[in-house]
Amino acid sequence: MDISMLSGINSDYLTTYAKQNSLVNTTDDSFGSVLSSMLNSIDETNDLQNAAEQAEIQFALGKSSNTHDLLIAESKAEVALQYTVAVRDKIIEGYKELMQMQI
């Protein structure tokens, strides 16, 4: 059953929306671009992990009593880490598949 007609959202709509809002880079599809994007993602994950650790330290020292901000920082760091690990696993899976190909 094709549900795209029910919701009015299809892949063309999503692609157009992403291009209009600069959510995707359409000018460069090279490996270097993908690698650069992944390295930026790793840096962002590291920054979020550091921010969560800093929030934990501030809370432990009593300088911050807002548990809500601490939970948000830890949740952001956890989601970013899960995403990074999932991407890493897919890259390793693809590498293993390439290595098993016969020449």
Image (cartoon, rainbow, N blue to C red):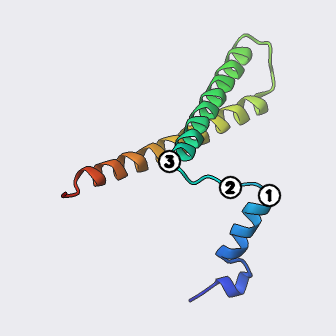
Q: Is residue 67 visible?
A: yes
Q: Residue 41 location, x and y as percent?
A: 60, 38
Q: Secondary structure at mark 2?
A: loop
How far is the residue under mark 2 from the one under mark 1?
Answer: 8 Å
Relative side of 56 to 92, left or right = right
Residue occupied by mark 1? 21
Q: Nearer the viewer, residue 89 or 15?
A: 15
Q: Quadrant of the N terminus?
A: bottom right
Q: Image quarter for residue 37?
A: top right
Amino acid type of disc 1?
Asn
CA–CA distance between discs 2 and 3? Answer: 15 Å
- The residue labelled by disc 2 is 24
Residue denoted by label 3: 31
Q: Earlier in the sequence, mark 2 or mark 3?
A: 2
| Figure check: 62 above or below 79 | above
What kind of element bears circle 3?
Answer: helix
Which quadrant, please, contains the C terminus? bottom left
**In the image, residue 84 above or below residue 66:** below
Q: Residue at x 71, y 22 (%)?
A: 55
In the image, residue 49 lies at what x, y percent? 61, 28
Mark 2: few/some/many CA within 10 Å (<14, 14-19, 20+) = few
